Amino acid sequence: MQGKQLFRAWTASIALLAMAMASAAQAQDISLNLPAQTYVQNAGSFMLAANETDVLVKKEVTTVATTPKEPYEPPLLSGSNAHLVLGLATIAAAGLTGMTAPEEGCEGVCVGPQPPRDVNGTHAQLAKLTVALAAATITTGLIYHWDDFSLEDGITDPDNLHALLGITGAAMMAVATANSAKVKTGTASHAGLAIAGAAGMVVAIKLTW
């Protein structure tokens, strides 16, 4: 009787040991397979995300490279434009001054006292306006284009000629206006000097425009 019980106990122990070993083997298989599968899935997701990032980067680079640059447009209100407008206004005022010049003196031999000259009329006022505009033109040119002048480039450089003719022309018109204002009667010889000064400013503008 005791022999049968021992045999049953021994048989049950062997069965339990076999089941335990089988369970351990199954658990080992599961633990080995799951990390590998997870790694493969994660690797696929990572590769997909990397590919999407590359596509986005390429699209961004392509977009930046193909976007045309807008042409630079200088501001309308600038010192350089003010210099140009003042120069043109000076020439226009000089033309109006010449058109309004009154007849002076007498023809042939002048007898008796000469009539007084109109030194405050339209012609005189336009002459003063022309000189003021010329002074403003020279001032803005020196302020905003000082770096364009260089003696190393020689006198024939367009920028140097522009400055020389512009300053000389403005000075000649100023002298002509001053000489005309000093003469109260008779004839004041100033027209030739004023015309030469205006011509100098016209050439100066033409050189750089």
Image (cartoon, rainbow, N blue to C red):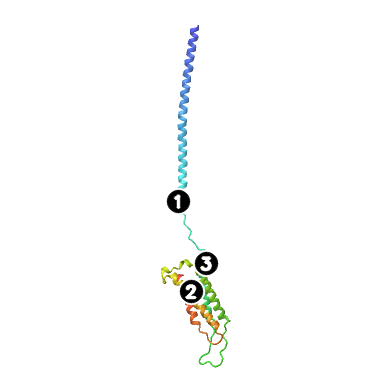
Q: In this view, does 93 lie above or below 47?
A: below
Secondary structure of the residue carrying numbered label 2: helix
Using the image, determine if residue 50 lies above or below residue 164: above
- In the orientation shown, which residue stands out farthest toward the right? 120
Of the image marks 1 and 2, the number of the one nearer the N terminus: 1
Return the x and y of residue 15 as percentages of the image width and height. Answer: 48, 16
Residue bearing mark 1: 62
Give neighbour class at mark 1: few <14, some 14-19, many 20+ (Cα, 10 Å): few
Precedes in sequence: disc 3 or disc 2? 3
Report whether residue 11 is seen: yes
- Which residue is identified by label 2? 167
* Residue at the (48%, 15%) spot, across then down: 13
Residue 201 visible? The answer is no
Residue of label 3: 79
> Helix or strand or loop: what does disc 1 sit on?
helix
State the residue in front, 76 or 13.
76
User: What residue is drawn where x is 49% and y is 12%?
Assistant: 9
State which mark lies toward you, 3 or 2. 2
Vertical comparison of 116 with 48: above or below: below
Q: Comparing marks 1 and 3, which lies closer to the viewer?
A: 3
Sequence-first disc among 1 and 3 = 1
Which image quarter: residue 128? bottom right
Dot 2: few (<14), some (14–19), or many (≥20) neighbours within 10 Å?
Answer: many
